[in-house]
Image (cartoon, helix red, strand yellow):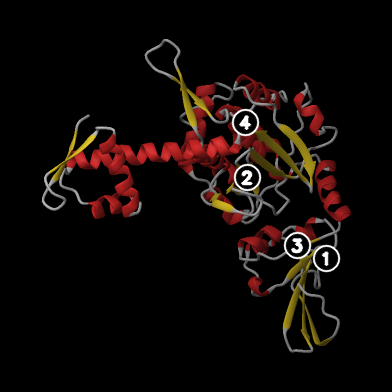
Amino acid sequence: MKVIQHFERMKIAFHGAAREVTGSCILLTVHDTDNAQHRLLIDCGMFQGERFADERNAEPFVFDVETIDAVFVTHPHADHTGRLPSLLHQGYRGPITMTHPCLSLTRLVLEKVGSTWDEIAEPRARITDIDGERLARFRELCNEKRRRIMPRADSNKTVLDKLGLLKNGKPLRAALLLFGREPQRWYPSASLKIGRFRSETVIVDDKEVGGTLFEQVEGVMEYFREHLQTSFKRTGAPSREVIWEYPLEALREAVTNAVCHRDYMDVAQTQVRWHDDRILILTPGGLLPPLNPQALLLPHVSRQRNRKIAEMLYYAGLIEKWGSGTLEIARSCGKAGLPAPKFEEDQGALWVTFPHKVNPKETREKTREKTREKTREKLLSIIRKTPSVTTAALSEALKITSKGVEWNLKKLRKEGILKRIGPDKGGHWEVSQ
């Protein structure tokens, strides 16, 4: 939002805390000397203490949230900040500004009342916003790991009650992130972004992973399994051991830690940045005191920013309660012949860097070789099924240029794998292997 030094008209509208003391929400509209309109929302608070407070908090805003240029929060009380998630849900994507002490006080207030962000009930949600199938899969995991037995006869409401994920019939924020039908409907920034970087500014692939926290972890791991390089080690057994470019168990642990311990009051997304020489996982919010980055590679206490989320991930077998996750990450990297990951705090986030042991140029060459092998195998498979296939048809099927097809055909003929029978037109191919 640009700085307005001169304006012609100003309008102030009170959408809360008028003839009452809660629900502070002030919309300031000004027109500059060019008659351009600028709108600033000051606070976006919850209504509290009255009979119909929950219904009022669930109502849509009477103004168009997409026309707001910026939001300014005066202080961290719920009657000044409580409807910010609803503002985001209804389409606001601009900046939310508050002082650092205000943000710190918001966290301190939660700590003083013995609560964490994820233990607060979402006033706009109902139990029907919980997905029964997702909750059923979690119940199966709990029974399989035997960390929390869930009787099959229990209803979904009973299960949520027993797990402490309901408050006055309303799902907690943790419940919506773990089992909600549309988690990002309630918390748009509670998602994960993956980028494949060739340099600090060149991004060749970009993917956003949403859904529940379980689905975000699995979505990232599926991406890694599809794109990481692999090699094979003979063990004497009939099957070969697969060696991944980075140890999958270490990556899974790091991604799980990120979605579990991130600060969901921060509007930034959890990020995975994959460079040629490293993978970097960025967790908004940094570490909780007294932890520091150096302590993570030594035995340390477990500090949980999101207690309910951590509890459910523990029941599902995804994390431990002993602060041992980062030590397991380091052990997995050492076993794979990789250096220990590097932990740093910067810009209000925790940065976990997994260095690569292979020269980036070698990695790119391996990628090219693997791509050539796949193209070659697919080309031979097509020819076996359709010996009279044309170069143009091969180009279309393989998604490469005609020159690329001709290069592969020439190489296969030179190696004696492929033979041309008859003329270019009317002839056919014969595979000798």
Q: Amino acid at mark 4?
A: Glu
> In the orientation shown, which residue stands out farthest toward the right?
101
Distance from disc 2 to disc 4, alpha carbons, whole Å, reads 16 Å
Q: Position of residue 373 (x, y in %)?
A: 37, 36
Mark before the other along the chain sequence, 4 or 1 = 1
Q: Position of residue 192 (x, y in %)?
A: 60, 47
Q: Residue at x 61, y 28 (%)?
A: 250
Q: Quadrant of the C terminus?
A: top left
Q: CA distance from mark 4 to mark 1?
A: 46 Å
Dot 4 corresponds to which residue? 253
Please tell me which residue lies in front, 109 or 305.
305
Mark 1 touches mark 2? (CB < 8 Å): no
Amino acid at the residue labelled 1: Val
> Residue 21 has which mark?
1
Chain-order first, disc 3 or disc 2: 3
Residue, far top: 236
Question: Which residue is rendered at x = 44% and y = 37% of the image?
Answer: 369
User: Is residue 329 among what the camera can see?
Assistant: yes
Q: Disc 3 versus disc 2: distance between alpha carbons? A: 25 Å
Residue to which mark 2 is pinned: 273
Q: Secondary structure at mark 4?
A: helix
